[in-house]
């Protein structure tokens, strides 16, 4: 298998696709007359809750590649935390979408991936379990606002008079 800079060609092609995803989510557009760039992440994030969850799930592709390349687990956790911060900021209406313009979790995660991945190594079952746990954690964090809305609506409905229910 031929290689480029210590990474096999298949992985290099996959990294190119992840770089394209990162640019699409974080840097697709430039504000005219400035160096300020933003991507589809804050735009998709305008759809309450669902938009932020969707972009967080897309962001997991970089973490999964980091897992496949056997990045140190602490780096994978750091990558996950970048996504969690992006998700938590993004769920705040309007302000979260503005924060998405500046907190570019995909750009941060690609930098971590490229800095810590000098060569490809096979993944172990424990590594797959770790990444599965990361995915579950991201989904759990995404579900918190939904559960909170349910609890508030349920509590509000309990205080309505019986004829209004």
Image: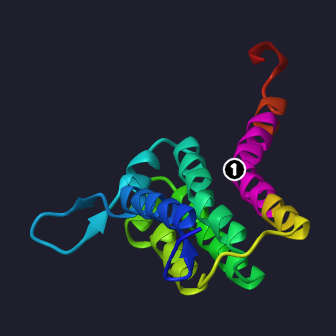
Say how the picture is coloured. rainbow
Q: Position of residue 7 (x, y in %)?
A: 56, 75
Q: Quadrant of residue 1?
A: bottom right
Q: Is residue 16 magenta?
A: no
Q: Nearer the viewer, residue 68 or 102?
A: 68
Judging by the rendered image, the residue that carries numbered circle 1 is: 145
Q: Position of residue 73 (x, y in %)?
A: 77, 80
Q: Quadrant of residue 80?
A: bottom right
Q: Secondary structure at mark 1?
A: helix
Residue reaching furthest left?
33
Q: Which residues are magenta?
A: 134-154
Q: Is residue 129 left or right of residue 101?
A: right
Task: Residue at 69%, 50% (x, y): give it.
Answer: 145
Give the dominant element type of the magenta stretch: helix, strand or loop. Answer: helix
Q: Nearer the viewer, residue 150 or 4?
A: 4
Task: Residue at 52%, 66% (x, y): give it.
Answer: 9
Q: Nearer the viewer, residue 73 or 12?
A: 12
């Amino acid at each position: 298998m031929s290689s480029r800079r210590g990474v096999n060609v298949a992985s290099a092609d996959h990294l190119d696709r992840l770089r394209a995803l990162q640019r699409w989510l974080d840097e697709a557009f430039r504000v005219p007359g400035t160096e300020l760039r933003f991507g589809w992440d804050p735009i998709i994030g305008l759809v309450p809750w669902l938009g932020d969850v969707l972009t967080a799930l897309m962001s997991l592709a970089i973490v999964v590649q980091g897992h496949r390349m056997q990045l140190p687990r602490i780096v994978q956790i750091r990558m996950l935390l970048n996504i969690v911060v992006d998700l938590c900021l993004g769920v705040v209406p309007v302000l979260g979408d503005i924060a998405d313009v500046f907190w570019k979790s995909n750009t941060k995660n690609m930098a971590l991936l490229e800095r810590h991945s000098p060569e490809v190594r096979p993944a172990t079952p424990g590594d797959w379990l770790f990444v599965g746990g990361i995915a579950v954690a991201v989904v759990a964090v995404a579900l918190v606002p939904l559960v909170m809305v349910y609890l508030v609506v349920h509590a509000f409905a309990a205080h309505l008079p019986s004829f209004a229910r």
